Amino acid sequence: MIDVKRFTAVLSVTLLLILSSGYAESNTMAAEQNEQKNGVKVLKNSYDYLGSLKKYAFTATVTNEVEVDGKKIVTKRISNAKVKRPDQFRIDTKSDYIDRTVYLSEGLFTMMDNKEKYYANVKTSTNIDKTLEYINKKLGIVLPLSTLFHSDMSKYIHPKKVQYFG
C-alpha cells in the first residue's frame, strides 16, 4: 500500500511538472508574441511621430562590412541629416573615402562630391516624399537614411523582427 501511495505521489508530481512546463512554454510564446506586437507598435508610433515633425536633425554612424580578396573590410561613415518639411533636406556624409553632400531645396535636388569638386542637380518636386520617389524610380538613386525623411515611414520600413527593450 505504501508503494502505491509513493507511486501515485511521484506520478502526480511528474504530471504537474510536465503540465507546468507546457504551460510555461505557452506563456513564453504568448509573451514573445505580445513583445513583438508591443515592439511593432512602439516602432509605428515613432515613425508617426517623426513623420509629423516639421523639422528635425540626427547624426548616424553607418558601418558596412565587405569582403575583398577574401579579407573582411569594415568601413564606417558618419552622416549628419537635417529635414525641414515640406521641401528641404540635407545629408552630409564623411568617411575616409567619402565627403558628400546631398540636398533638396525648393524643388532642386543636388548631389555634391566635396573631395572631387563636382556636383549635379535636377529639378524635382518641392515635396520631400515625391522627390525621394522620383530620384529612386527615375534616376535609380537610393539615398542612405532617406527612409527616415518620408512623412509615412511605415510605408517603407517593414521590420521582420522587433525586440522591445522597455
Image (cartoon, rainbow, N blue to C red):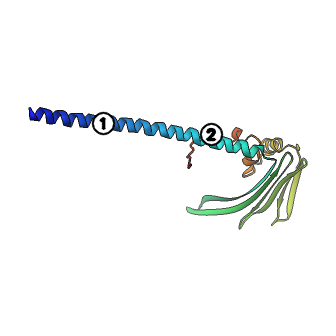
123 or 71, nearer to the observer: 123
Q: Which mark is residue 107?
A: none
Q: In the figure, is residue 126 to the left or right of 73?
A: right
Q: Could you tell me the amino acid type at mark 1? A: Ile
Instruction: Report whether residue 86 is seen.
Output: yes
Question: Residue 146's x, y, as percent?
Answer: 75, 49
| Labels 2 and 1: the sequence-earlier one | 1
Q: Is residue 115 above or below residue 134?
A: below
Please report contact status of discs 2 and 1: CB closer than 8 Å, yes or no: no
| Amino acid identity at mark 2 | Lys
The numbered mark at residue 41 is 2
Side of 57 where 165 appears, left or right:
left
Q: Which residue is mark 1?
A: 18
Mark 2 residue crowding within 10 angstroms, few (<14) / some (14–19) / many (20+): some
Q: Under tag 2, what secondary structure?
A: helix
> Quarter of the image containing the N terminus?
top left
Image quarter of residue 137: top right
The quarter holding residue 63 reads bottom right
Q: Nearer the viewer, residue 7 or 162?
A: 7
